[in-house]
Amino acid sequence: MRPGGVTSPGTTLENKTGAWRNFRPVHDNMKCKRCCEPVAIGRLERFVADWELEKGLRIPEKAPPTGKRVAVVGSGPAGLTVAAELAKRGHDVTIFETLHKPGGVLVYGIPEFRLPKRIVEAEVEYVKQLGVKIVTDVVIGKTLTVDDLLEEYDAVFLGTGAGLPSFLGIPGENLSGIYSANEFLIRINLMKAYAFPEYDTPIKVGKRVAVIGGGNVAMDAARCALRLGAEEVYIVYRRSEEEMPARQEEIERAKEEGIKFLTLTQPIRFIGEERVEQMECIRMRLGEPDESGRRRPVPIEGSNFTMPVDQVIIAIGQKPNPLVMRTTKGLVVDKRRGIIIADSYGRTSKDRVFAGGDVTTGAATVIAAMGAGKRAAEAIDRILRGD
Amino acid sequence: MAVILEKVELAENIKEIVVDAPIIAKKAEPGQFVIVVVDERGERIPLTIADYDRKAGTITIVFLEIGKTTMKLGRLGVGDEMAHIAGPLGNPSEIPENETIVFVGGGVGIAAVYPIARKAKQAGNEVISIIGARSKNLLIWEDRMRAVSDELIVTTDDGSYGRKGVVTEPLKEILENGRKVDRVVTVGPAIMMKFVALTTKPYGVKTIASLNPIMVDGSGMCGACRVEVGGETKFACVDGPEFDAHQVDFDLLIKRLGTYREEEELAKRLFLEEIGGCGECRSHS
């Protein structure tokens, strides 16, 4: 997904970093602790996209029509990439999106200050200019099944992401005032609840907000809460800052903005009458490394304490939404991780059905999803051409 | 975009619309719902599919104008479009065979219970229906319910029509008289469904309630609609909306439904000012 100029979405990162190698400020202080995302995609995207928006869109040459039709499920980074690639190769592509706006996590998840919506709109416009049809308000697994799509399309790509929020499973978690990060961010980003009542979707503005989790989504939610007008925002994380999965830059930004970090702390209960009022936590210490290689947090007995909170946002991770998996026969899934099994070219166990991005890996990055979309497009193109 | 093809004012603040939605009509089953966005600044709200016509490619929605969004929807006329509609969402109702089923519908919930009762009747079940409204002028779809019921009992809170009282009274009498009832299915305000569940529990009659929590996406993404059933957290949108009413924590549901009460009141007041209403004449709805 790339407006103009750059030819293939999967290579945008290389192209961008190549093209802008001399743009020092973008590269400085962008070191990731774990190599998941080597650069701050938000700022780099924004710089390049701004530059391209000014220069105007350039639509690349398209191959002659092949007469083959492909359905893409989901309009996030993986879906937009695979659609653009296949359209360029002459295939007739239709994207199906559950929500009323295309963009997937780019519109519902990533806040405006990290990725302005006009950039996403430009990316979507570019994909449309390539001839891709985008149909919103269609829930695959409900409105239509994958098997319905296979009757009309030569191939189906599943890029449905990781949109199912995880919860802690502790008492009081369903009290009013406790949000999943998904709900909190969807209300703000997709529904523009920050502009209530000009926009109809409301959101509560907490005074003392606890965001549970230490990933990029937790940082986004915390910074959004602050921007909505919260007086105090805490990141509550069960390990130490060293183990936080968020990128270093996001952690630093959050701290600069005044978000307080409460590490080695695990909520064990939420308390409240009509709404959440208190959070009981227990202090943790780090034990031996676990299967993730990070030191396992161990509760310190008797260290319980309660803190007053009036809003809690649970940001401890997302899994793929099972709607498509449950309604598609012959699709092999990893039940434990809730992901669709696919090889590096996105091929699933089901004939003519491909998958890529978070739905095959669990929650990962925009860049990884785009790469998966690019590889799947190559594989789909080969099969459609009968190679 | 979805065009409104027909519109009927069923009662004060209760409207029925028939919407052009062929792909939804094709898959719709009793018990399912749609998510509607009235205009581009609108919120996403769930509304039950009250009827569908696969051949004509239409679905019927019945709604109470209770807040800004439903009021905006109620102001759309035939030929107007709502910005977005998605569905059918949620799981279809389980339709048993050879059972005696009591359907209990309250307010606009009568329209939601109707397609379930109709399908149950078509499947050969004995259908007893109890429908209730605050008063006669707020009672909807009595004729439709009568057509699909072996027996129909109507109640009004003020006694202006049918039996005076609430729906749980005739329900209790049926159960007390020792009549064989295999299941009770209820749709209506959360407080009504809570009392239906409390009424049937001592008799051990299987009771199903269709829950109506706040939703955003309706597809399992946001968790706004989470409810506690048997101590477990469920998402009404993908795990429901129907659950074993004896296992549902209705008090929690009611608390969560009240999350945005202040915001809803504010939005409604501003909207009524904008459209020139006084804001008082509809305050009882």
Image (spheres, rainbow, N blue to C red):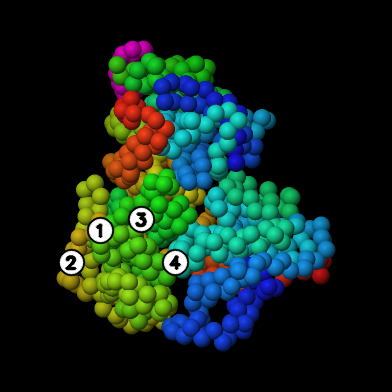
- Inspect the magenta stretch and tell me whether residue B168 lies in it: yes
Image coordinates for residue A342, horizontal then vertical, percent: 62, 68
Q: Residue at x 28, y 65 (%)?
A: A233
| Side of A278 where B134 appears, left or right | right
Image coordinates for residue A216, horizontal then vertical, percent: 42, 70
Both labels 2 and 1 in a single chain: yes
Task: Quickly name the residue at label 4.
Answer: A113
The subunit letter for the residue under badge 3 reads A
Both labels 4 and 1 in a single chain: yes
Task: Quickly name the residue at label 2.
Answer: A305
Q: Secondary structure at mark 2?
A: strand
| Side of B144 where A202 appears, left or right | left
In the picture, residue B58 is in which quadrant?
Answer: top right
Task: Quickly name the residue at label 1.
Answer: A207
The subunit letter for the residue under badge 4 reads A
Measure how far apart labels 3 and 4 are at the Cα level: 21 Å
- The range drawn in magenta is B159-172
Q: Secondary structure at mark 1?
A: loop
> Which numbered marker is on residue A179?
3
Q: Nearer the viewer, mark 3 or mark 4?
A: 4
Both labels 3 and 2 in a single chain: yes
Q: Residue flagged by tag 2: what amino acid is it? A: Phe
Q: Residue flagged by tag 4: what amino acid is it? A: Phe
Name which of mark 2 and mark 1 comes first in the sequence: 1
Q: Residue flagged by tag 3: what amino acid is it? A: Tyr
Name the foreground residue: B78 vs A376: B78
Residue A155, compared with residue B204, is above or below; it is below
In the picture, residue A118 is in which quadrant?
Answer: bottom right
Q: Nearer the viewer, mark 3 or mark 2?
A: 3
